[in-house]
Image (cartoon, helix red, strand yellow):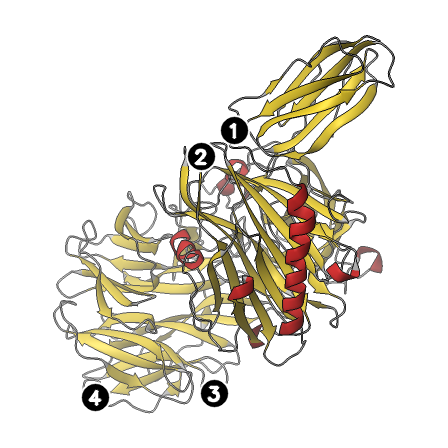
Amino acid sequence: MKSLMFFLIPFISALLFSSLSAQIHEQNKYKGVPNIVTDINAEHQNELYFGKKFNSNAINRPNRGTVSLTEPVHFPYQGAYSYYQESLPVLLENGQLLLVWVGTDSLKCAHSSDEGVSWGIPIVITTGHWPNNIAGLRTSSNRVLVIWHEYNGIWMTYSDDNGFNWSAPASITYNQGDIRTTISKTLDGKLWLLYSRLNSTTHYDLYYRTSIDDGESWSSEEIFYEAPGPQNYGMVVSGNGDTLLATFEDRSGGNWELYLISSSDGGVNWSTPRSIINSTDDEHQPRLLRQSNGDLWLIYYVNKSTPILPGYMQSDIYYTKSIDGGNIWETPTQFTFFAGDDTRPNVELINNQPFISFASFRWERVLTQYHIWYGLIGTTEDNNPPPIVFNAYPLNISSDVPIEFQAFIDDESGIADVRLIYSLNGASLDSVQMYDDGLQLHNDENAGDNIWCGSIGPFQIGDFIWFVISATDLSNITINVESGGFYIPAVHDTGNIILNFLPNSQLADEGVTSGSNAYWPIENGNDYLCQGGLWIGTDNLSEYCVMNIHYYEKDWTRTDGTEFALLPGTSDQDGNATFDDRYPQQQQRIGLQVHQQSYQWRDSTCYDFIIFEYTIQNTGENGNLSNLYASVWLDPDVGDANNDLAGFDQTRSLIYMYNSQGIPDGYFGLKLLGEENSPHTARAYNNVEDIEPYNDYERFQCMTSGFPSISQTVADYRIILTAQPFNLAINETHRVTYGIVLGHSLGELQVHADTMEAIYNRTVVSIEDFVQSDIPTNYSLAQNYPNPFNPSTKISWQSPVSGRQTLKVYDVLGKKVVILVDEYKSAGSYEVEFDGSKLPSGVYFYQLKAGEFLSMKKMLLLK
């Protein structure tokens, strides 16, 4: 959008684009399941779409005033966009309640002296760890013991002063396969640590260790239970007399069931297991408690299919009780009634009633953003849980037709109304009604199937849409869920590859559309790319920093006011996008702006490749930068993703993937282009043998790991290709170029890669303006020389940053005479000649626009 005002005065041209921001910290990638990828910035996290502040507690979790345990309570120390799934209640010897929970990379705890009505200041237990499946208890000597597993085994910490000070974490086991830990105590004070391990027959068995000195030392490892199916979450307590009782979950019978076994010889031998719950649903994570009178409580969660929506699951907390030492159990009672997920319970006895902390995404603004909740059996009733938005996404993303949305919603009482609220490029817009009436008009499937539909648009290429689903149930409870955001992509389609690209370096758009992610029509119409994009990292700031596109995390943001378009140019389709790292999602920014140009040709010899060139500029936020690495990371899927293999052709700087079954027979390749861009790292890692790099330290190691041998295990692979390291002074630029290439065989892929290299050198490199070594420090537009002139004159200017630049000439009436420059240019100094031989004598004005800089000067043509 441009506006001009003339009348012999300088004018101002303004173009404002802003991006919304949020974080969806999904730790897993769901291929084939539509899920919207967000590219938003943290500055706007709390903005609602009608100019009001979106307050998480006020909007999504009702303000109940004084906390009461008569309904499930949201634990207070949790950020609106943070992910909390693990918690542990412990009753201290002084009668206070301690709650331990897992943060991003830490363990914390807080005290309550009124059974969870209020909480003291959080205390950090440990940092630098990534705990999972935390468990713990108070020992006979009143030590509080907390255990967990992480990637390299089982760890432990303890406190001897009621949770105010904690020991340094220590390892108990060193096997990264030791997971699903529990710890319990029998009447003799013995501690029982149980955990699962994947054995050679590809299922989990239960192992255990014991301690008789409050965890100071542990017995050697013993097998606890073996069966044909997997077992998890074993727990041992004292029964009647000298009997020991143990529960665990097992899938030997086809579905997950809870079993009870007993031992009369101190745990040396155990009885044949018997099922506690006779159900066709899946019961998980049993927590067994023994009251002082010998009564037993069993708390667990049930995972079952939703009643209406096929393919979606819901979980609720249940409990049962036995008053005869575990022989007879009461009919299970449902504790929570949320139509979504109430899961991961941990329990403690308070006044002989189980206090339950659990994970749930009820009332959360972000899909599947778990938080910690708690309640007390006998006091808490879950009478009015909110609706759940399981998923919501656009059925189509295009610039020329309205975009249709589907939302999958459920509630224990039923849904009364659903609306789609959306914003366009940061500007608040209206909401639209969604329908579940079965009418083809609304692209609805069946009336009453809880699949709601509506449409908005159409929009323009480069527009950013952020949308919220607002659902109201029959009890008049409304939930607002931030369902996602997306750009309207540009699409390379002039050659034999159809590829979405977006103004944040993202290549392909996983889970949103098909037939546009490195879509290759000549090979049975297969998409060859789930997602990919640019990574730039360094280890020379205060912490490892990698600006990246990596599944749900996207650090690049479109630079305000810059072009995003596909137009004829050097090739038949030149793509232009400029983005920067103003809004990284998890860490400090490096201080970079990147101009991306892409090229695709219509000529049959160039059908099967697309070239991407990245001009990287140091914006100066962190001074001069050193030891920078630029990579392209891709997740290709050739046919069935889990049947892929990878290889590397070092002579061509070409890493590639193909299907081990030859279905399809296509090869997908990523190549570094240009003599200056030899690879530093070429790596292919898979989902079977490797760990996905989900933090910046791991990403930096991945992108700087050199040339590790590529596994020949058939699996789902990702590839990364890194250029040589480089340094950038303030405002200096550096260029790296990559190409995506396809071929039916390895030989054909290599031929196409060689052709791509030749085309790049002949048509792209030969016409580019190379970056000047003397980078200006400020904008300026010089007076033309000579002036007056006849018939030609020279106009010079300089720009300290790269970006789109325009130089236009107008007459005294404000009529545009000629456009001398309208293109992306690197930071530097430039000069053009203006020929006025076909113009009458008189006064003319020339105007330069470069980024936010705008300047106009007068010149005189005298003939």
Decide which of 145, 258 is in the foreground and name it: 145
Q: Which residue in the protein does label 3 denote?
A: 253
Tell me, yes or no, whether the two marked residues, 3 and 2, touch with CB atoms within 8 Å: no
| Foreground disc of the pair 3, 1 | 1
Q: Earlier in the sequence, mark 3 or mark 2?
A: 3
**Whether residue 746 is situated above or below residue 6 in the rendered picture:** below
Decide which of 843, 342 is in the foreground and name it: 843
Q: Amino acid at mark 2?
A: Ala
Q: Which residue in the protein does label 1 denote?
A: 775
Across and down, in percent, residue 17 comes to: 64, 33
**Whether residue 571 is situated above or below residue 222 in the rendered picture:** above
Tell me how far mark 4 sits from mark 2, CA to CA: 69 Å
Tell me how far mark 3 sits from mark 2, CA to CA: 65 Å
Decide which of 427, 668 is in the foreground and name it: 668
> In the drawing, does residue 473 fall left or right of residue 733?
right
| Residue depicted at 21% across the width and 54% down the height | 95
Across and down, in percent, residue 462 comes to: 69, 42
Q: Earlier in the sequence, mark 2 or mark 1?
A: 2
Tell me how far mark 4 sits from mark 1, CA to CA: 78 Å
Q: Which residue in the protein does label 4 denote?
A: 268
Q: Earlier in the sequence, mark 3 or mark 1?
A: 3
Q: Which residue in the protein does label 2 denote?
A: 729
Question: Circle 3 — which element?
Answer: loop
